[in-house]
Image: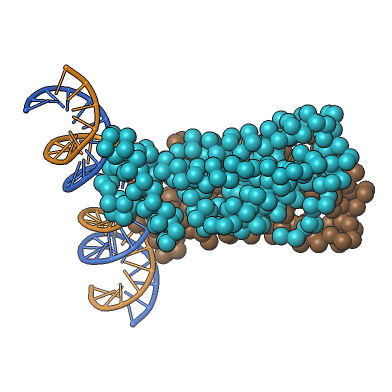
Chain colours: A brown, B cyan, C blue, D orange
Amino acid sequence: MSFEDRKSETRDKIERAAERIIRSEGAARLTMRRLADEAEVALRSPYNLYGSKTGLLITLLDKVNAALFKDLGSGDHDWVLIEMIHTLDQTQKVYEADEEYHRGIFWEIMISDHPEARAAGHSNIVRIVTEMTVRAKQVGELLDGVDAIALGEQLGLSILSTMGSWAGGNLTIAQTIAHTKLVWISILQLAAAPEPAAALTKHLSVFGD
Amino acid sequence: MSFEDRKSETRDKIERAAERIIRSEGAARLTMRRLADEAEVALRSPYNLYGSKTGLLITLLDKVNAALFKDLGSGDHDWVLIEMIHTLDQTQKVYEADEEYHRGIFWEIMISDHPEARAAGHSNIVRIVTEMTVRAKQVGELLDGVDAIALGEQLGLSILSTMGSWAGGNLTIAQTIAHTKLVWISILQLAAAPEPAAALTKHLSVFGD
DNA sequence: TGATGTGTTATAACGCGTTATAAATTGTAT
DNA sequence: ATACAATTTATAACGCGTTATAACACATCA
């Protein structure tokens, strides 16, 4: 077995043990000593491979996000803006399937004192949303005066901060997506051309939580 | 000196030392041992008086909020909904005066593992915002079909989660308020009667950050 | 004055994330 | 087979929030 093989075997043992602990006892109960025991590796090994506990959790979250973003926006819609709303539904579905697992990981990363971890997730989502608003602008779904990039930043900020409240345990993912839909559609009523704006209102369930 | 006098003297020493440390070195550098040294009290004392580090920080935050909420909504406006926007400006002014101090305290409370601390701040703000939307409904500023309480919950959630992003260091307080204004006004365009809705648009600076 | 109880102090300890140190194990190259 | 390099291991330690223990100071009440 080569150096790389041994490394990825250790990685496997650690990641599987971490998932096991988080699923059975919650992310808050995942400690490095407990993890080393469960994975049957030395306390030092996760630090060698991921740098920190946060680094390990980011790895776990990236697995989920890879699965999520794989077939994002694969639907067939009349408007880019409707596709954006559909993306919210997909996101809800993925996270809802294993809500506590994702929420716990999200939260631990969010409150870690590695600010670069937060910033990475932050700019990631803003980038994805901005790509969509820019595309909407290109096909004429946004009003002439609207800055597509600034709009994307505001919509991205909205979902990001709401997911922060979800991670903190103050919301379910369903409430999170419902609120984000309300905010996105409300803002887009002011930014979108008449036709896609009208199409958006069909997705608006008014002021329930 | 009575029991109560001695207690409040210790309280004073601790709170002043805490403010001193947070202002000079940041809230992240406030440790209980450092605090006990600086305040010239035993390590145990803050725990006796505030229960936990989070309890102390909540006390510090409450001082600020008392000053803020004291003359909230004291302006003289044609519409309740405009008063709500003005409240955002007041909030920005208060927090901006000492941004890093407030941000640090906010963040430490937010990430503490005392969930009741988060929940308290959460329901506090939602209550205040909901009181305003209910008042707006009573004076006929909201459309007939609109549930004022559900609306207040959504607006409260919006500012709360955005302030979470601020606390995490991803935004300035100015950006936080600007985003909240955009969201509130956009949503209120759908929920408000024509006249106040028109008045609100004057406060909308479109899609800058 | 003396007994009681409240509050503060000093000291040690726990589990946490993380790091340092040195030894042991194992792949790679000569 | 031998030497070198990469990786994992075991052990101890650090500062953190928090708690336990026991001694001490002092207000209150008899």
What residue is rendered at 63% in x and 33% in y? Answer: B127
What residue is rendered at 45% in x and 42% in y? Answer: B59
Tell me the quarter of the picture where residue D6 sits. Answer: bottom left
The image shows residue A69 at horizontal and vertical percentages of 68, 52
- Counting the numbered discs, the total is 0
The image shows residue B88 at horizontal and vertical percentages of 68, 48
Q: Is residue B25 above or below residue A19?
A: below
Q: Is residue A8 visible to the viewer in this orientation of the structure?
A: no
Name the foreground residue: B76 vs A153.
B76
Quarter of the image with the C terminus of chain A is: top right
What residue is rendered at 52% in x and 39% in y? Answer: B118
Q: Is residue A38 left or right of residue A158?
A: left
The image shows residue B50 at horizontal and vertical percentages of 38, 39
Quarter of the image with the N terminus of chain A is: bottom left
Q: Is residue B180 above or below residue B194?
A: below
Name the foreground residue: C22 vs B161.
B161
Q: Is residue B22 left or right of residue A129?
A: left
What residue is rendered at 68% in x and 42% in y? Answer: B74
Q: Is residue B203 above or below residue A147?
A: above
Name the foreground residue: C5 vs B197.
C5
The image shows residue A94 at horizontal and vertical percentages of 65, 42
Q: Is residue A88 left or right of residue A81?
A: left
Q: Is residue B145 visible to the viewer in this orientation of the structure?
A: yes
Tell me the quarter of the picture where residue B5 sits. Answer: top left
